[in-house]
Image (tube, rainbow, N blue to C red):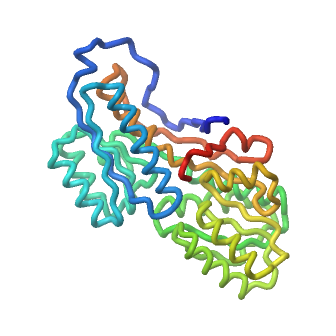
């Protein structure tokens, strides 16, 4: 089995992850507590986030004897704000947070930062995303996720009529949309309609049913998330529509990677947006305390196009996503 590997395209990286010389037992026994706040596993991608957060928490604590990592999951922004406050009360030295809705959690994150704690923000950034609210930002390349998908569609089916299923009305959704529009710019690809699917396979199923009712001819579907692609494919199959040539999703779920690997004509490619990014943020945060390296700035992962030719490199059968 090939372990999943992720291209690490670094934009504005001020974080060095080079191995530092051994700092001795005293340094390794240094007492540090890292709080990790993430959304609950309400769909496949967030299930992957939880899996990787819990996996790497154990690895880091085994590596650094003085380290405690506390992972808390939350179902919604209000409960996540409470979770962040609970972590602060427990006396954390650092917070790694993937916010369910960043703008709703700005106050809670800001309080931790203002208390002089190290803050690593993952994936979803608020409207203001600079060193006033966090020390480190780790994310997938949201504009590139959309642009890679758009360019593929424009090259493969240059006159395609496309329907788009968006995620949630938050900043990264708009970044992906802007990237997609850039990717199809100059082509004759026509976007028939865009609706939010809330990164949910059930909601995407309903949106796709609506699209199928409204539009007698659809060539391609672009949806931002592989979970939504599951609902889209089910709606197409139930409607017995044969006009739709293929679907492009995103994130790199093992089920969709397997479809690509097997040459499924309805899922010829996928675009990576790995949930393991939370693990990267946790590792860099630990490095801030235990290695002699400065950790700050932006760490952006590549939005790799997964094709039949390279899909095996990204297939990780043991992952929950």
Residue sitting farthest toward the bottom: 213
Residue 133 vs residue 181: left or right? left
Residue 66 vs residue 121: left or right? left
Which quarter of the image is occupied by the N terminus?
top right
Q: 251 above or below 241?
A: above
Counting from the top left corner in percent of width and height, residue 227 is at 59, 63
The quarter of the picture where residue 248 lies is: bottom right
Residue 180 vs residue 93: left or right? right
Residue at image position (36%, 31%) is 60
Counting from the top left corner in percent of width and height, residue 89 is at 15, 49
Q: Is residue 194 visible?
A: yes
Residue at image position (53%, 52%) is 320
The quarter of the picture where residue 20 lies is: top left
Counting from the top left corner in percent of width and height, residue 90 is at 16, 46
Q: 15 above or below 144?
A: above
Residue at image position (34%, 28%) is 62
Q: 5 above or below 17?
A: below
Residue at image position (32%, 31%) is 61
Q: Is residue 118 visible?
A: no
**Which of the two residues, 188 or 309, is positioned nearer the viewer here?**
309
**Which of the two residues, 311 or 193, is positioned nearer the viewer here?**
311
Q: How many marks?
A: 0
Q: 241 above or below 270?
A: below
Residue 70 vs residue 156: left or right? left
Counting from the top left corner in percent of width and height, residue 129 is at 38, 50
């Amino acid at each position: 089995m090939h372990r999943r590997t992720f291209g690490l395209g670094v934009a504005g990286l001020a974080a060095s992850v080079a191995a530092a010389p051994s700092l001795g037992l005293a340094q390794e026994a240094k007492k540090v507590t890292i709080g990790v706040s993430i959304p609950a596993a309400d769909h496949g991608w967030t299930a992957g986030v939880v899996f990787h957060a819990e996996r790497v928490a154990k690895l880091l604590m085994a590596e650094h004897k003085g380290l405690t990592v506390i992972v808390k999951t939350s179902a919604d922004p209000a409960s996540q704000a409470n979770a962040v406050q609970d972590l602060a009360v427990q006396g954390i030295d650092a917070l790694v947070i993937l916010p369910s809705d960043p703008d709703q959690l700005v106050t809670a994150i800001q309080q931790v930062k203002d208390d002089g704690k190290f803050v690593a923000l993952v994936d979803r950034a608020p409207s203001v995303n600079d060193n006033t609210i966090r020390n480190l930002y780790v994310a997938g390349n949201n504009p590139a996720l959309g642009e890679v998908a758009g360019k593929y569609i424009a090259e493969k089916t240059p006159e395609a009529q496309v329907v788009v299923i968006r995620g949630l009305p938050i900043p990264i959704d708009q970044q992906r949309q802007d990237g997609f529009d850039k990717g199809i710019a100059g082509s004759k690809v026509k976007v028939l309609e865009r609706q939010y699917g809330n990164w949910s396979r059930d909601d995407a199923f309903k949106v796709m049913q609506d699209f199928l009712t409204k539009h007698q001819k659809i060539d391609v579907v672009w949806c931002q998330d592989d979970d939504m692609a599951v609902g889209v494919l089910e709606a197409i199959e139930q409607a017995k529509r044969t006009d739709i040539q293929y679907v492009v999703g995103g994130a790199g779920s093992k089920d969709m990677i397997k479809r690509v690997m097997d040459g499924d004509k309805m899922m010829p490619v996928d675009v990576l947006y790995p949930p393991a990014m939370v693990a990267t943020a946790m590792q860099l945060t630990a490095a801030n305390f235990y290695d002699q390296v400065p950790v700050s700035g932006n760490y952006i992962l590549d939005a790799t196009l997964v094709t039949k030719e390279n899909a095996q490199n990204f297939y990780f059968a043991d992952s929950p996503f």
